[in-house]
Image (cartoon, helix red, strand yellow):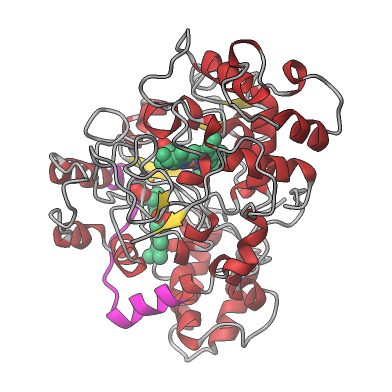
Amino acid sequence: MIYRSISTLKWLIFLGLLTACGQTAVNPDEQLRDIINMHQLTGDPSQGRDLPRISDPLAQLGMQLFYTQALSGAGDAACVSCHHPLLGGDDGLPLSIGVGAADPALLGTGRKHPEGALVARNAPTTFNCGLWDEVMFWDGRVESLGKTPLKNGGDGQGIHTPDRVFHYADPEAGANLVEAQSRFPVTADVEMRGFDFGMSGHNGSDIRNALAANIGDYGDGAGTIPSNDWLLFFQSAFNSNANAEDLITYAAIAHAIGEYERSQLFVETAWKAYVQGDDEAISASAKQGAILFYGRAGCAACHAGDFFTDEQFYVTAVPQIGYGAVPYDDDWGRYSETGDEVDRYAFRVPTLLNVEVTEPYGHDGAYQTLEEVVRHMVNPETAVAAYDFNQFDSSIHMVNSKEHTEEALAQLHENRNKNVKTLMSMTLADEEIDDIVNFLLTLTDPCVKEPACLAPWIPSELLPDPDGLRLDAIFQN
Ligand code: HEC
Ligand code: HEC
């Protein structure tokens, strides 16, 4: 069992101790060793988990599926369009561009859509996505019910998805959150589905079944992919002789994609080495940053445990940019799931592992640099007041951004008044901000910055392409 949070009482005692210690100069390593014990950190959030390796046959099949544009309605987008390993497991854009891109193969900040960014939110990284236990998505609309108190009834077991009423399990969700999540990008029009998917029926199951039939080359899907070798790949990965109708279902596709994503484990950080006893693993500034993070700056109250998230939802008033999810032109985040007033503008706490490479930041990518988003987390009022609402070109819809950001800030203040856990405000010196940023930089696994190390998660040119629709990305700023 990994402890992600500590009780409020312990936290108060701990803050008290820190204040007491502040009187005398304490060796930062001693201070941090106490913090590490207090928070029961191991440095390794993957401990006790059974995650696949990228060399596993199902993860290999999942990689091929993750890169194929055959899972999009018009053959112009793949999962990897928005989650490329060389872009930190995301797309480097504030708001993603899926179908209809000017050049579908072009990834990175040069990716454009004639109508601008239509996707509602910033793409989170797929790196370490096998470590989420409770929720996926910024609003948690894919959710493990076993861990959630039954606020509104529901059946309390399994995995909830947007295909079911809130708090009810989706019997088709599959074995884990990642697998459940991978059922939804293909049904979202702006992500992969497109706007003129020529097929009967419009609900999620119809679309998934049609895509599986295309990949499996059976039924109405027969012949839709001219050169189609998928059956051989499925038979080999599942070690089965079954025919395409039985083997190539969307559930099997989701399972394989999930195995690929869950194999993306990148947790070998300098901070881990430090937690596990190497005093030399991080710089003096990063140590001061860690002391602030776990102490006075209060970050660990939400970015808790070895995965740096408590998987809960809080209002932080990160500026609202883009069209948003629900309602149109705004984004109420968790409120759209729960309908609780305190959840209006609340978003899931992101992990901070590898945060160095997952820019831009926030649910809508409103902040380009780590320093900016850290300044926001330290003092949302001054950050919002200083935010440049004119910094983007016309590709990002900004019509009501400022008003909605102010509404989010008002919600934050209301939550504070009601004693609902939310972001506090404080003043830190510039040097202290630098220290926190330097601490966050110790949460990078060097592998995520080295193309050679990431190569196993990218199909090589030598690997046979099952359908000739593999997205071979080009990168351009
Ligand atoms: C158009 C870009 C785009 C495409 C294509 C896309 N995604 Fe995403 N992905 C996103 C965005 C944006 C989010 C966040 C949406 C939200 O939270 O409401 C997301 C969320 C996720 C998450 C949740 C991560 C987390 O931390 O909660 C996973 C996992 C994921 N996508 C995997 C996939 C898979 C698998 C596919 C292909 C089947 C895919 N994505 C296709 C943009 C994309
Ligand atoms: C009350 C809970 C809470 C506290 C305290 C908190 N955060 Fe956050 N943090 C969040 C939430 C929620 C988000 C996502 C907000 C959004 O996108 O709307 C976030 C986002 C971030 C991000 C952006 C990550 C990404 O991938 O987009 C960073 C970096 C960050 N926080 C660092 C910090 C630091 C450093 C502190 C302490 C100074 C801190 N946070 C304090 C809840 C918190």
Asked if residue 362 lies left or right of residue 48, the reply is: left
Q: Residue furthest top?
A: 200
Asked if residue 302 lies left or right of residue 70, the reply is: left
Q: Quadrant of the C terminus?
A: bottom left
Give me the residue at 83% from left, 21% from top: 242
In this view, the residue in front, 251 or 110, is: 110
Q: Position of residue 292 (x, y in %)?
A: 43, 74
Q: On screen, 223 above or below 405?
A: above
How many discs appear? 0
Asked if residue 344 lies left or right of residue 34, the reply is: left
Res. 157 in view:
no
Which residues make up the magenta segment? Answer: 414-438
Q: Position of residue 300 (x, y in %)?
A: 48, 61
Q: Position of residue 466 (x, y in %)?
A: 66, 37
Res. 99 in view:
yes
Give me the residue at 60% from left, 31% from top: 180
Give me the residue at 47% from left, 24% from top: 187
Q: Residue furthest front?
A: 226
Q: On screen, 430 above or below 88?
A: below
Q: Position of residue 183 (x, y in %)?
A: 56, 28
In this view, the residue in front, 149 or 268, is: 268
Q: On screen, 40 above or below 414?
A: below
For residue 60, what is the image quadrant? top right
In this view, the residue in front, 437 or 112, is: 112
Indicate yes or no whether the magenta region holds residue 294. no
